[in-house]
Image (tube, grey):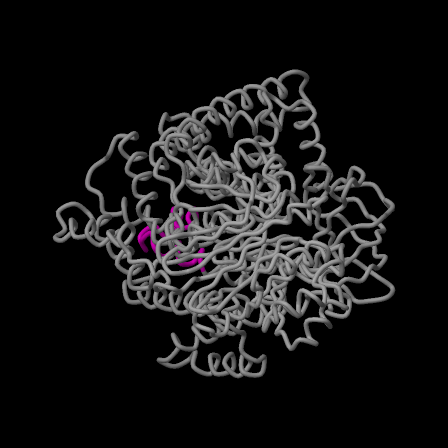
Amino acid sequence: MDGTQTGDLRSALLALAAGLLLLRFIPQLPPVSLLLACALLGLILLPFRGYRIGLLLLGFSWACLSAQGALDDRLDPELDGRTLWLEGRVVDLPDVRDGVVRFHLAEPQSRRAELPQLLRLSWYDGPAIRAGEVWRLAVNLKRPHGLVNPQSFDYEAWLLAQRIGGVGTIKSGQRLSEAGGGAAWRDGVRQHMLAKDPHGRAGGLAALVLGDSSGLSVADWRVLQDTGTVHLLVISGQHVTLVAGISYGLVFWLARLGWWPRALPWLPVACLLGFASALGYSLLAGFEVPVQRACAMIGLVLLWRWRFRHLGITLPLLMALVAVLLLEPLAVLQPGFWLSFGAVGLLILIFAARLGVWAWWRTLGRAQWAMTLGLLPMLLALGLPISASSPLANLIAVPWVGFAVVPLALLGTLLLPVPWLGEGLLWLAGFSLEWLFRLLGLMAAWLPAWLPSKLPLWGWLLVALGTLFILLPGGVPLRSLGLILLLPLLFTPVERPAEQRAEVWMLDVGQGLSMLVLTRQHALLYDAGPSFGDFDLGERVVLPSLRALDVRALDMLLISHSDNDHSGGAEAVARGMPVKRVVSGEAPALPVGLDAEACAEENWSWDGVKFGTWRWAEATNSNSSSCVLMIEAAGERILLTGDIDARAERALIDSGHDLQARWLVAPHHGSRSSSSWALLKAVQPQAVLYSRGKHNAYGHPHPSIVSRYAAFDARAYDSVETGALRIDLGSFGEPQALREIPRFWREK
């Protein structure tokens, strides 16, 4: 293949890849008829000079049709919230934590309805479940639905990328057949690891060997995130490449030392053995999409090394990219896809044009420095934290995991049938991993991860250009200009409300409440969402959203009362950023570390915006003890009521305060014990806000309460339908609902 043909092939692959990648950036999927027309036009253009446009159209059509197929496989809306009996096989390894078993059920069958091909189910206090078993289950089914906030994990995108068409909660069930096959063997290995639990690191070893990260605690994830080493404990291209490299290197060194049979060419054997090792490890790890991606990349690189090295290194990368996207176009919805290909591209940029041979320590150091800086624009675009300690942490952890933990863990797993030997190797692997986590924990405490504010497009483009300049080879002019172009990271102007205006956010925290109030120079958080064991919405939703909105400190954290759905996330928020003052209607019932003050009748002004609090002094229970907050900006008011009941509402009315407000946060999420006629007459709300979880067990908001607000012509805003809601208090305008921002994978 000559240079012209290579160039044509490269441009053809680029066009096809561009069409496939476009899926990530379109707000809505085109109609199927239009996609079929685009595909037909692409086929017509292929024999002519416009073949690149034809390939782009074909790639785009295929990606959109694949995504539409996944959307069509979602649970029928008529089945949303219904309970059905169904049968199916457990696939992959069940996730067991906090008394809840979560697993995927493949090809479920029901006599009463047609179901998606894959369901994600949860069984609270359920029995032990093994991969490969067949179960008959009574399941309360739900359509995919996630929280939508300024910054939080996009659960709906993740479900679609996994082609999970529905979720559900199991009410009861019975096992129809025992486990069998490879999935059962993997589960057996995991159970053995968990039973022995070498040095308390069975979860980490299972993640490295089996691709099962459910055993890692929230504290473990926090350490990995703060040090930029998440990729080391999640099966990725690095692990698969390491296994392939060991096999390839074994043959290479035997040949170099003259111990390889001369009649047998060493290079094809090395490449085949390397790919076979990578494939075997991938199957052991469950062959998930990221592992498939790594396997495809390694296979193409080894093929390039064997037969096509003269074509350059970028060609196999492009071929791997196209192969992965053709097999699974929805991979573009996963951050790991962008980070893995971005990392490989950066390594090519850094090392392809180097002169001479570098020492191993210099090579590793430059690679880690380049990864930290080069992936910065991608991390910003994906809304992921940035670790300042990542270069040092990876410089230590990469060889530690790659040459000690992984080989020991893999050998220990394979040799488990050999008495003492397999368990001894796993013990050494756990010992090594434990000390690595101790070291990473010190680094995380020294330099925790940083989540910068969202940059405007122009700021992001400058940062991306700056990183490119810095990564260019030495001697290239204007490299130092890159440092100046990074300044938007630190000095991008932040939009704040004008004097006498306030920006009010009702965050989407499910069955709970958290509201942020921003004035020109102050920030107040009213409630912090719930916490369920390790699943703390204060840490996972509220805190990232505050940082995304450039809130770096809170002047006040006001916790209405001590119920978990209002106070559960408070400690995570206080741990994550400075809080000048904590106030609560039930201060003694909150954790001592918050040092909360009792809510009292108090009035103050920030930047021309008026605030006032009230608490019923004769409250006899938690709900009626809620601290009520009134906010007024330029004559427009919002009343935040916590969970007060009808008796507390009457006391509030009798207190003599002027309660008229345009916006009212429904007391107790719309419970029928609240929102009395008397309160609504006193407030005269034009709009009511419901903060609640979809299909919540309490039936909030109650239909009678919804009808009551409708009788007052109050427009309803439900967090289930709006996601996070932004109100520009003082403008008397319409709110902005984040769920209304079009994303083709989001439930409407």
Residue 461, position in %: x, y? Answer: 29, 61
> Where's residue 249, x and y in %?
42, 33
Where is residue 325 shown, x and y percent of the image?
50, 61
Q: Residue at x 30, y 34 (%)?
A: 365
> Is 110 placed left or right of 490 in the picture?
right
Question: What are the residue bounds of the magenta stretch?
Answer: 301-321
Of residues 429 and 380, the one drawn nearer to the viewer in this rendering: 380
In the picture, measured across the screen, residue 366 lies left or right of residue 702, that is left
Residue 666 in sight in this render = yes
The structure residue drawn at horizontal position 46% and vertical position 25%, both measured from the top left corner, is: 436
**Magenta stretch containing residue 302, yes or no?**
yes
Looking at the picture, does residue 247 appear above or below residue 48? above
Q: Quadrant of residue 730?
A: bottom left
Where 402 falls versus 646 (above or below)? above
167 shown above or below 583: below
Residue 269 is at least partly visible in this image: no
